[in-house]
Amino acid sequence: MEHIHFPSLGTRCAGDLYLPEHADGPVPGVVLGHSGVMVKEALADFAPSLAEAGFAALAIDYRTVGSSEGEPRGQLYPERQAEDLRAAVSYLRTRPEVDPDRIGLWGVSLGGMVAIQAAVFDRRVKAVVAHSPSIGDGWRSMLQLRGQVGFKGLRDALEGDWEARVEKGESARVPFLALEHEEARKSQELASQRYPTWRNEITLDSLEHLLMFAPDNLVERLAPTPLLMIANGGYDPYHSLDEAQSVYRHAGEPKRMEVLPYDVLGLYTGEGLKEAMGLAVDWFDRYLRKARLATTTPAPTS
């Protein structure tokens, strides 16, 4: 694994590049995006599966997160995260180990939906995998998660923060995750120990950007880029199956959805992780390694 840096619209971003041990030439590449303001080190449980299968896997930190630069820290702007994924594609295309015409995107949780949005706007991306995807429509998701009373409280807080931003030029800071599920909370505590660069904190105005984030309204324009969605079928209050299925319904072909029998943490560890990454490897193998690339048809000469 190699620590790398790449520019994203003027900001220096960090990445971990996992390369296959043996390759007879340029290999297909995959850019991996983490969830929310988690960090690239958390993707060390996912990226090696791709490298072992012969792909160059680049796990990145988005701007203002982890080892990447950018101020203020912890801005969770999904539209900028999509730009960072696209910038990572640009970087990966410069690496001699990588076939520049065979690059895909993989994202987990919010990162899965961010990967979909990035690929809608970037035809250089030849395949997408959304692993345990979460928000398809930010407004709808927030309302469902918080309820009417909680959602009104959020809007009131954002209005107050807007006035403070106009006056002082900066947003308040709030926790990103306030998990109620016991096992998920324990996982969050472990993450704080394992990943020194992670901060469970975002700018409050990030929630405005999440409310505006709606890949469900764009995904119909993803085709013909192949889309695989891998969702949880067990109890999961944070990765809504309804959201994933709505996005899937609106997507064009080729597409595939796998709903696996695991709960909220089931696709992040153990057999669930192994099964889900096996599906991802097969998808990328089919559409990055084996699929024919579209070519330019020459004009008739007579």
Image: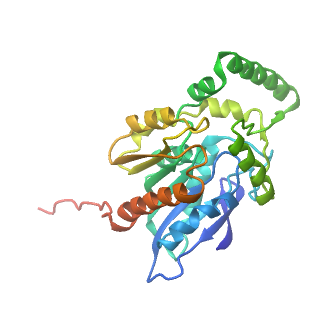
Residue 71 location (% of width, % of height) = 80, 47
Can residue 56 be seen? no
Residue drawn at point x = 32 percent, y = 63 percent? 291
Q: How is the image coloured?
A: rainbow
Residue 234 location (% of width, % of height) = 52, 40
Tell which residue pokes out farthest to the left in this image: 302
Q: Dividing the image into 4 quarters, which one contains the C terminus? A: bottom left
Residue 141 location (% of width, % of height) = 58, 29
Q: Is residue 168 left or right of residue 288?
A: right
Q: Dividing the image into 4 quarters, which one contains the N terminus? A: bottom right
Residue 175 appears in which quarter of the rendering? top right
Residue drawn at point x = 71 percent, y = 20 percent? 150
Between 243 and 293, the one nearer to me in the picture: 243
Residue 151 location (% of width, % of height) = 68, 20
Residue 296 appears in which quarter of the rendering? bottom left
Between 259 and 68, the one nearer to me in the picture: 259
Q: Is residue 45 left or right of residue 65?
A: left
Q: Is residue 277 above or below residue 260?
A: below
Can residue 272 be seen? yes
Q: Number of labelled discs?
A: 0
Residue 236 appears in which quarter of the rendering? top right
Q: Is residue 185 left or right of residue 137?
A: right
